[in-house]
Image (spheres, rainbow, N blue to C red):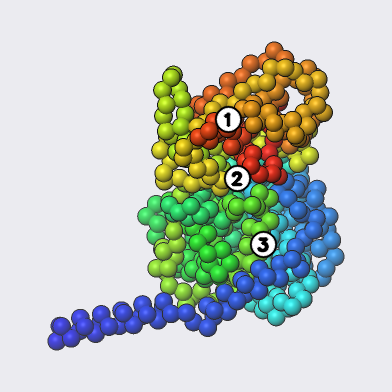
Amino acid sequence: MRKTLILFLTLMTLLETQCQSSKPAETSRAVEVAKQAFEQHAAYKEAALQDRRFKHKDIVPLLEQLRQNRLFQVQVAGQSIEGRDIYLVKVGTGKTKVMLWSQMHGDESTATMALFDIFNFLQNPGELKGLRDEILTNNTLYMVPMLNPDGAEVFQRRNALDIDLNRDALMLQSAESRLLKKLRDEIKPEFGFNLHDQSRLYTVGTTAKPATISFLAPAFDHAQTVNEVRGRAMRTIVGMNEGLQQLVPGHVAKYSDAHEPRAFGDNIQKWGTSVILIESGGYKGDPEKQYIRRLNFATILSALHIIGTESYAQYNLADYFKIPQNERYLYDLVIKDVWYKENGKDAQLDVGINRYEPASTTAKKGFYHRSAVEEIGDMSVHYGYEEIDGQGMTLVPGKVYDKPFATINELTPARAKQLLADGYTTVRMQNLPTQADPEDLPLNILTTTGRVNHGLALFRGANFVVKDKEGQVRYGIVNGFVYDLQGEKPQLFHGLIL
């Protein structure tokens, strides 16, 4: 009798697992929603937002215009530390309340752009009218498109008090944090979307693929307990992942489940709202994250479909844990197996280089790139957005051309390419260009008496040439950017005023 009971329970468990793992009709519909939204995105893309560094003043006219549409309720819900208005947009009549907030970190703006695309979709759905009507009939949406406008003003993570808002859910020391807590408590949403950006250097597990989108259903305790509230978020993520895998196969990861007691996502999950964290990472050839913006648009609409139809219940929790973990195995540039001479001795090694974006008042984009060597040695488990196979080649520190140029105009593209071919990455100049955009500098610029060391060292600038077996320069590396001298000058390539 006991053996029969055990066999029966085993069969029932297998049957339940098989049913949970099978793809129901609603699952395939969610995939179709993601695909349709992705394909139709151009029709809804907000033209006023074309790059990541827009400011509060750029979105206010869009929100005030939205206020004129009776479909929406637009209100100023509060102010930032520096007195900028923080808006709340309400739309829909459905029973399920969903709250979405973006840019609580001022330099994480990808999802903000996607929210404005969603506003356009909701106003003029075109071919996707059926999806729009379904979402607004089943859900009531509450959206805060820019929670940290002061941080956005200077494109920094923290607010005007230098407080990380996502570490202020307990003490509520900042006005923006208190506002987010107040809205959550008043609205009492069943679902919440915590929309962020993460480093472009994260990978999907230990693969070479960037973690373009990462999900998380934040843990509300250190034990990472899964209750009904967190479970709903996890199941919804499974559906969102299924849709994204059709659009960017292998580029979806899961953010760390480690509990952070001060974080809003973890606490809002604990307060009874099913929280879904979306982190926008990197994608090759997408520095302004316009492709990732499109993915955000598609996956959020897919999620709103899943939530509104309650089809999340049909997804298997175990599939959430199958999503590969975020890891950090990427660099902007990796030079592999190259020879380098130090103290008279040759060594074969790998070099990892990353690029950063300091603010600049002279650059057209408001920032420039400054690169640094961040790894030397065995990088066999690491990858680069760009890679140089240095087999049989030699890395040589860039030289300084000592005969000064009078002005930047003398340093023509042809002259700069010839200097690179001769091993020079830096030139001297009698009159430094005080208002020059760094992207206009074909090589590094130094004063007539300035000194610089381009030798290979950790955290030093990346200025080298890579020579082939015949001793000819194949690659020039200036400020971490690569110029293959057998090809055309790359679109993004510039030096610095040292």
Q: Residue furthest front?
A: 470
Q: Which kind of residue does numbered mark 1 sit on?
A: Phe
Image quadrant in which you'd find residue 295? bottom right
Residue 102: image quadrant is bottom right
Q: Amino acid at mark 3?
A: Arg
The structure residue drawn at horizontal position 76% and vertical position 53%, both measured from the top left corner, is 50
Callout 3: SS: helix
Q: Is residue 204 above or below residue 439?
A: below
Q: Earlier in the sequence, mark 1 or mark 2?
A: 2
Query: Dot 3, crowdedness within 10 Å: few (<14), some or many (≥20)?
Result: many
Q: Which residue is mark 2?
A: 165
- What separation in Å lies between label 3 and label 2 (alpha carbons)? 26 Å
The location of residue 57, given as percent across then percent down, is 80, 48
Q: CA distance from mark 1 to mark 2?
A: 41 Å
Viewer-side label of 1, 2: 1
Residue to which mark 3 is pinned: 294
Q: Quadrant of the C terminus?
A: top right
Question: Would you name the residue on which mark 1 appears?
Answer: 464
Left or right: where 92 falls relative to 334:
right
